[in-house]
Image (cartoon, rainbow, N blue to C red):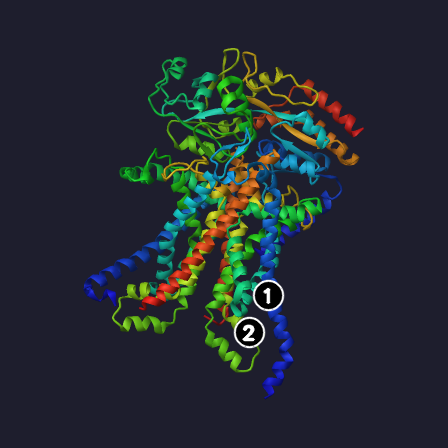
Amino acid sequence: MAGSIKRSGKFDIERAFRGGTAALALSVLVLGAIIVYELFSSSGPAFDRFGFGFITSRDWDPVSELYGALPFIWGTFYTSILALVIALPLSLGIAVFLTELAPVWLRGPIGFMVELLAAIPSLVYGLWGLFVLAPIMQEHIQPFLAQYDYLPFFKGYPLGLGIMTASVIVAIMILPTISSISREVMYTVPETQREGGLALGMTRWEVVSKVVIPYSRSGILGGVILGFGRALGETMAVTMVIGNTPQITMSLFDPGYTIASVLANEFAEATEKVHLSVLVELGLILFVISILMNSAAKLLLWRMNRYGSGSGS
Amino acid sequence: MNGGGLGYGRRKLTGHVMMAGSLVAACIAVALLFWIIGYVFIKGIHGINLDFFTELPTPVGVEGGGLANAIVGSIIVVGMAALMAVPVGVAAAVYLSEYGRGLFASSVRFVADVLAGVPAIVAGIVAYALVVSRMGRFSAFSGSVALAILMLPIIIRSSEEIFKTVPNTLREASLALGIPRWRTVIKVVLRTASGGLVTGIMLAVARVGGEAAPLLFTAFSNSFWSLRPDQPMATLPVQLFNYAISPYDDWHEKAWAAALVLIFMVLMLNIAAKMYAHRRPGR
Amino acid sequence: MKKVLLLALTVLALTAGAAQAGITLNGAGATFPYPLYSKWFYNYEKQTGTRVNYQSIGSGGGISQVKAGTVDFGASDAPLKAKELREANLFQFPMVAGAVAVVYNLPGVGSGLKLKSQTVADIYLGKIKKWNDPAIVKDNPGVNLSAMPIIVAHRSDGSGTTNIFTWYLEDVSSQWKLEVGSGKAVKWPVGIGGKGNEGVAGVVRQTKGAIGYVELAYATENKITYATLGNRDGGFVAPSTEGCIAAAASAKVPDDYYARFTYAPGKDSYPISGFTYLLVPRNLEPSNMKAFAGLVGWAFEKGDKDAKALHYVPIPDKLKDRIKADLKKLAK
């Protein structure tokens, strides 16, 4: 009774609170709109000149002002997906270790150390990749993989610098993002769920793979999306090690190029209007790729949920 | 139970192998951390001395000199960015997790995810257009805007995930006591989630604290002392970048020292956050 | 961290008072001359109290920022054409010159491998693929060259270094001029791109058989083996400030100071040399213009020693006098 009076008294605060948070959430949309507007307006000259052919063209010749985005789009996709392929199992492993296996006193320090990987500046990753990782790749890992050169992934001359090294570096950089979010959501799986699984005679691994991971998959996917976003936009470290050659290749040994890298390489020194505008348009394309990948992830989650609930446990 | 046909021994073996795999994954991550930080440490430790923290930068070949202005500048620029991004990000996350249903909420989520993929340099371009070209000069504030753009999506998405982990039973208990929803959010949800929130903010700070690309065209840099937010300001990552790309050993050493200090600062911040999270009740 | 902050604030309080008096000039642009400019401007502040804050954001950035008026002067590794200068109402002039070294990694071969300029062009065109190609062997009797493949490395970031290097290749090879051309970023026929000097040096150091190009200072300071290049008059010249001075002396510099002297005549000329420029709005505020003219005059008079120590090349005295006279007119 007293509660209802109180509630009506607080009604305005309630609405204000909700409205206020909604307004701040709206600011994210506004920010997105501003960025798109900026990119659109500055890429006008490039779009007028090349139209949609820009996306499918493979040329990149600043001297004769011929520009095509395809090799950069390819490189961005390829390195980011590879990085995810490397980082996802590792991140899940770390999260499983921290929530299921590690003694409690060890969880804090290990989790902390993994998160510290995010604290290392991009340029430092780049220099480490260039001077430490690339030589190891060139002398040990790539010659080993070159035995399997009937696969399209391992053809060509092992240079060290290239798509493979770039993907590995990016994978390390997105590890903390994916693993820390996965860990947080795995923590929230109720203990009763785990006990239930164990009581059914499942092994610990089966509890993880059939109970914990399915239970927390939406959170894991959130981490994956964030990590993937970072992989797409990663600039300095990739630029230092990818070899910066605009070509479309399957081989992990070959040098490649990403959108973020070409921005980092050419933006500061570009003087011609069209050149600058083309670079901004690439930024816009990166935005669109990001949208596509996010939609794909959402779709995947939606299907997973549908089929997951259909088959039962 | 499609696994029922397999022998228990084999299932057990798979289990052991997979769990051992998770241990290996954790070891790999920790080893990489030590490897990279060790590398930075060996290259940078010679450049660390008192001058490094108290003196202004000196040119090649001049003894001494440090990055005092850049260290302070980084703290100011990142701090101002956090002041902008954290309240907005956390509030937006509150909306998404506590009220957010429907098209508006999902579009905010979606845009936040997409923004997480914006390369740092693009954030710099936007901040340049929004602030620098209007003010007619480079400024520390415009650098903060660029970094805030990068921080915002990280904070929103990580905060929302954390809020979602607050058990609904807690909310329901609070509401059942007649406490209005907004107080429940502040007193129960935010408090319970504070440890995770701080972790997310930390990750965001760590992520942008080392960025040089968005600051080049915004905060610019300064060879001298300046604490005014409307003037160019030196920052560690930009100095690190300038030194790293120079031809001289003298400056390379300073670049590595700057990297070491940058990592150390984030480490300290992490530890502070951990201590904060431990002091708080909650998980 | 609090301690650091406190300490820093104290230092600030001490220095702020002393340095408040003078004028402050902001400049931005090319990365190549950044080490030298920072040295000059540091000394200049000590001697005169005028603060010059120069930041290396890239030549393109320097040009666009001086046009936008966010800085007092810009710096670029490549000169602007007369038309663009007129449109933007800018005055440009060379500040200092520099050389680019061709570096390589051949086990057992030290610095001084002789490469004709045509050979360098053919390597970068992908026509010469092996180190024991007759074109290389012929000029290097007694040097043990194997059939190792040549791995070509180039700068991936737009850079003045690339601009000078591709000017040179254009001068040397008509095929290069026709198929590739010159600029800060070009479409490379072969090779892999490294970001910055350290990116190229990283490839060259770690890859046996690699060849690349870096600034002279980078090659000498970091002890990478570099080639002796054939010049227009048939001499072989190692990269050095002297070789660059010889080349700059032959340069014909027009009124807008747009000068290109790669592959210059003269027996001692090093073939890959060029100027780096400063740009200033003709209508800069009078007080700032005066300060700027003073700065340039000071650097021309007292800066040569610093320049040489850092492997930059002072411009000829006659040129300095012309520029000083022009600036005097601008500052009235």
Q: Is residue B45 visible?
A: no
Q: Quadrant of the N terminus of chain C?
A: bottom right
* Chain of the residue on which disc 1 is drawn: A
Q: Is residue A133 left or right of residue C169?
A: left
Camera-side residue of C40 and B20: B20
Contact between labelled residues 1 and 2, with CB atoms less than 8 Å apart: no
Q: Amino acid at mark 2?
A: Lys
Q: Is residue A101 above or below residue B75?
A: below
User: Where does the image place residue C131, in percent across and percent down from the top left?
Assistant: 37, 21
Circle 2 is placed at which residue position?
B187
User: Where does the image place residue C36, in percent across and percent down from the top left?
Assistant: 61, 31
Q: Residues within 10 Å of mark 1 (few under 14, many from 20)?
A: many
* Chain of the residue on which disc 2 is drawn: B
Q: Is residue B37 left or right of residue C315?
A: left
User: Where does the image place residue C3, in percent across and percent down from the top left?
Assistant: 59, 55
Element type at marker 1? helix
Circle 1 is placed at which residue position?
A22
- Residue depicted at x 61% and y 58%: B84
Q: Amino acid at mark 1?
A: Ala
Front position among marks 2 and 1: 1
- Residue depicted at x 59% and y 38%: A48
Q: Residues within 10 Å of mark 2 (few under 14, many from 20)?
A: some
Q: Quadrant of the C terminus of chain C?
A: top right
Q: Which mark is residue C23?
A: none
